[in-house]
Amino acid sequence: MYPRVIALFLFIFASGALQANDAAVEMPLRFDPASTFGEAVGLQAPQTFEIREQHVRVPTVDLTVEPDDLWERIRRGFSMPDLNTDLVTDRQIYYINRPAALRQIFTRGQRYLYHIVDELERRGMPTELALLPMVESAFNPMALSSAQASGLWQFIPSTGKSYNLEQNWWVDERRDVIASTNAALDYLQTIYEMHGDWHLALASYNWGEGAVGRAVSKNRAAGLPTEYQHLNMPGETRYYVPKLQALKNIVAQPELFGITLPHIPNRPYFVTVESRVALDLATAARLAETPVDEILALNPGYKRPVLPTNGSQSLVIPASKVEAFLINLSRHDPASASWRTYELRDGEGLESAADRLGISATRLRQVNGLSPRARIGSGYTLIVPSESEGDRITLANLLPTKPQAGAVEPPPPRTLIQRTVVRGKNGRPMVVERKVTVQESAPAPARGKAGPAKRDAEETDKPATKSGGKAATPTRGAKPGKPEKPSRPEKAEKPVKAVKAAAPPAKGKPEPKRR
């Protein structure tokens, strides 16, 4: 009987377990957070969130509206293909590790960038080129290289003359912001049309279009790529385009590099005014109610403190000061100028002009770059400081160190060797030498108007050679002991050797042979 009871009990237990399993499969597992187990493990009731579709706004740029910031205008005009090389990364690291220098470059550029960008857009050129003066001169218009390249765009004298940039005693248009920018963009357009590639055009600007053309031809002949990065070129040129690309990347995304660009309003920084009133830079600064340093930075092409007096004069002043300048100019008394020009009259010398002007001759020579021996004649234009000489320190770098064309500097005295043949103690002829100093005279200065020079100050007339008097011979190339024939009167222009007649040889002794 017991076995049957046990079997019946097992059957009932098994049936209940199967029903429980079926219920577990049909019903999902539910967890009651209020249960003792839930409290034990520290679980909380799950939170529910409503998920909605998020619409990400794509930023758009309205190209019909001019941006307020000049940097944004520059970014919109970027159109050169990007250069992605290790050298670009290297230059990016170089610039971002020098934030103070980079800040100084951007600050200098605030004066000139608007004008450059305006010219680029007018010509349909990429605005990356507005950053090129950062590479060339760090936006310093007074920059001068060891190769005598000058200005924002670093023109050498010969290339400057090829692009009609005037260079004389009064002005150097390689440093003039407006003139040099026009010339630089003309040149860049020319070499771009030559190569059809902006990277090659930039390499030509640095290395020369002929050199780049030869490098391209060499690669083409060898079946090699002719793009900029594949050419064999000097190290300076190899880094040249990567520098510009690095600056472009920084300007495009300054926040990515941890750089803060100074705000530059998208409006003209300066304007050019014309004046028929004789002006100097110190007076112009006073009339424009602007610091002299700012006027010098906007007019770096002028090499003297006073503007040349050849008709109307162009002056660049801040755009915000035009109204004040014109009002003050209308009330200006020319006698109150800090500097002025004075033209020598017929028969008037520097000393008499100094007396007339109420200034010492020494000071007048100093401010005009004239040595005490320089000779000038009528028509020569002098720059004359006022009694107060305001802003003397600021304008000191504009004082000439050499005179303008029309002044004649006598050559320095020459030390010559005079040789004389005399009888020695033993009765034989011997040569006696002594040094003599000869001062050659300078030609008379040319008469007529000197005005703004058409050639460099170094190009002065060659001095004539003094003739006549006691002849002497220069040391260089002389052969001691070799007497020369006396010079003929009609050929007395050049110094010649003067030899005293040798004494007759002593009796019984032969005359020495001469070669």
Image (cartoon, rainbow, N blue to C red):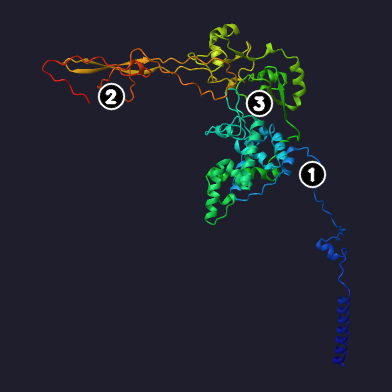
Residue sitting at 58 percent across and 50 percent down?
A: 229
Tell me the quarter of the picture where residue 148 sits. top right
First of labels 2, 1 by sequence position = 1
Residue 429 — which label?
none
Q: Are marks 2 and 1 in contact (CB under 8 Å)?
A: no
Q: In front here: 211 or 326?
A: 211
Cα–Cα span, label 1 and label 3: 34 Å
Residue sitting at 32 percent across and 25 percent down?
A: 477
Label 2: element kind: loop
Residue 479 — which label?
2
Q: Residues within 10 Å of mark 1 (few under 14, many from 20)?
A: few
Question: Which amino acid, by three-letter code, is at mark 3?
Answer: Asn
Tell me the quarter of the picture where residue 441 sits. top left
Quadrant in which the C terminus is drawn? top left
Residue 299 — which label?
3
Cα–Cα span, label 2 and label 1: 83 Å
* Residue 324 position (above or below residue 133): above
**Place of residue 476 in the rendered image (x, y in percent of width and height, measured from the top left):** 34, 24
Q: Which residue is under mark 1?
A: 63
Label 3: element kind: loop
**Place of residue 87 in the rendered image (x, y in percent of width and height, measured from the top left):** 58, 48
Residue sitting at 66 percent across and 49 percent down?
A: 82
First of labels 3, 2 by sequence position = 3
Quadrant in which the N terminus is drawn? bottom right
Name of the residue lying farthest toward the left: 508
Tell me the quarter of the picture where residue 236 sits. top right
First of labels 1, 3 by sequence position = 1
Question: Which amino acid, by three-letter code, is at mark 1?
Answer: Leu
Question: Which amino acid, by three-letter code, is at mark 2?
Answer: Lys
